[in-house]
Amino acid sequence: MMDAGQLARELRLTDEVARRLDEWNYGVLPTVQKEHGREALTVLEPGQCEHWLSRWARGGEVLRVLAPLLEQVRGSEALRTWLLLQDALLLHDLLSSGAPKPPSGMLTPLLGTEGDALFDLLCAISAVPQWFATCRRLGVPDEYAWASVPAVYDNAETFFRAHGHWGHSRDMHWLAHYIEGKLFRIGRFEYMVREAAPWVPAVFRSRRTGRMVLLARDNWKFLANGLRLPLDEPFAKAEYTTSLVQDGKVIRGTLIDPRGFARLEREVTLDATEYEAAMKPYELTAEIHIPGGGGMTMEKAQSSLKEAREFFPKHLGWKPPFFWCVSWVFNPDIAAELPASNIAELQRRVYLAPRDSTRDSGLHFVFERTDGDWLSYPDDTSLRRAFLNILRRGGILKNGVMVIDDAGIDAFRPGFYAGVEL
C-alpha cells in the first residue's frame, strides 16, 4: 500500500485532505483490497467498462469520455489506490466512527472538475462487478444483477442534466445495498431486505379469515384529520396521541383506514386468540422501492409482486411476511389530483397508511431540485402540475405508507382492503 504522504503528493491533494487520510480510515485499504479489490478493479481491464455500459443507450458516449481517464488510472498506482479508498468510503462505509463523508472535488487539482466527476462515475461503475459477484455467491441468476445496473445509468443521467458533464453523485449508499445482497430489482420494483421501519404500522392478521388489519403504533402523533404530525411540527401541535396495548388476551389500538388515514374515533379491540402479529420481532421483510421511468401499469406491478414473492424463498431461503413501501407515490393527494393515473390505480389496490414526513417529499424526485423556489418550477408534465397544484392550495407534499400481503397480491383489485370494520 502506498505511503499516505506519497499518495497525497502524487494526487496533488490539499494539505487539509492529506491530514484527514487517517480520519478516513486509510489504514483499512489492505482489507478492502483483499475483500473487494479484485472485483472493484476489474473496471480497469480492457473491455470491462464497455461490458457494464453496453445496455445503456448512452453507454458508448460515456465510454468515449471515460477512455482517457481509464488509461490514466491504469498507469497510476496513486489513482488506483484512491479508487479503492473511495470504494471503501462510499460503497462499504468503512469510515472511522463519526467521521464525515469525504467531500467532492478532492481530485480536481489533478484531474480538473470534469475529471473529478468522472472519477466518481468510475467508482460507481466499480460497484457493478461487486454485486454480480454477490449474486453469484447467493445463487441469484445474472438477470437480476443486470436488472439493477440502470441504477448507475439513471444517476449519471441526472448528474449530466444538472451539471452538463458526466459524473455520479457521491451519495452511493444505494449501490452498496446491491453489493451487500440486500437489494434486488425484480420487474418494475426494487425490493430491499430489512426489518420493517418504525413508521410502518403494526400489522395483524386474522387466523380465521386471513384478513390483514393495520393499527397505529404506540405514541404516534396525529392531527385531527387522521394524518401524522409532520416531522417539522412540534409535538405540542399534535391533536391525538395513540396507544397500542397487547396483554396476551386482547390487542387494543387505533385503526388505520386502508385509504391512508387513522380512524381516531375508532379505538378497536382485537381478540388475541384470533389475531396474531403478521411479523415477529426482528423478522426480515421486503421493502419496495419504486424506480423512476414511468410505465408502472397494474399488470407490471402485480407481475413484480408475484415474482418477488417467489424470488425470496427460492434464492434467499425465506418468505417475507408482507411487502411494504414508504414513498410520495402513496400520498392520497396525488391520487386525488390524478384519479386516472397509474399512481391512483396502485393506491386503490393496496392498504394505505399515513407517514410522518417532511413537507417536500418527492419534490427532488419529480423536479430534480429542492431549492424552495417552487413557483419557478416547470409544469410540463401532469405529475409536476399535480405537485404544484397541491402547493398552490397550501398543501404539503407528504409521504405515505403501503402494505400488501399475499391475498392482496393475488386479488390486486381496487378496494380489496376497503371497508375494515371491527
Image (cartoon, rainbow, N blue to C red):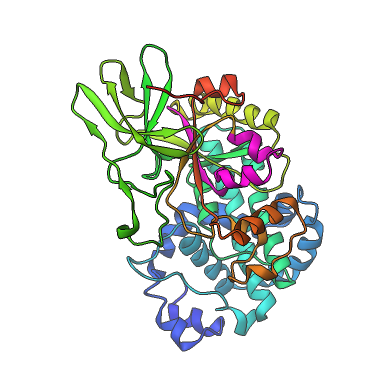
| Residue 23, picture quadrant | bottom left
> Looking at the image, is 76 positioned above or below residue 47?
below
Give the number of marks: 0
> Looking at the image, is 144 positioned above or below residue 89?
above
Q: Position of residue 250 (x, y in %)?
A: 23, 23
Q: Is residue 52 left or right of residue 137?
A: right
Could you tell me if residue 389 is visible in this image? yes
Q: Residue at x 43, y 64 (%)?
A: 29
> Looking at the image, is 150 positioned above or below residue 287?
below
Q: Nearer the viewer, residue 239 or 417?
A: 239
Q: Residue at x 55, y 52 (%)?
A: 175
Q: Residue at x 69, y 56 (%)?
A: 384
> Looking at the image, is 220 positioned above or below residue 108?
above
Whether residue 90 appears in magenta in the rendering, the answer is no
Q: Nearer the viewer, residue 184 or 352?
A: 352
Whether residue 326 appears in magenta in the rendering, the answer is yes
Q: Which residues lie in the magenta part?
A: 321-347
Q: Nearer the viewer, residue 56 or 259?
A: 259
Could you tell me if residue 187 is visible in this image? no
Q: Position of residue 394 (x, y in %)?
A: 56, 60
Q: Position of residue 173 (x, y in %)?
A: 50, 56
Q: Nearer the viewer, residue 18 or 147?
A: 147
| Residue 209, picture quadrant | top left
Q: Is residue 76 left or right of residue 246?
A: right
| Outermost residue, top side | 208
Q: Position of residue 105 (x, y in %)?
A: 57, 78
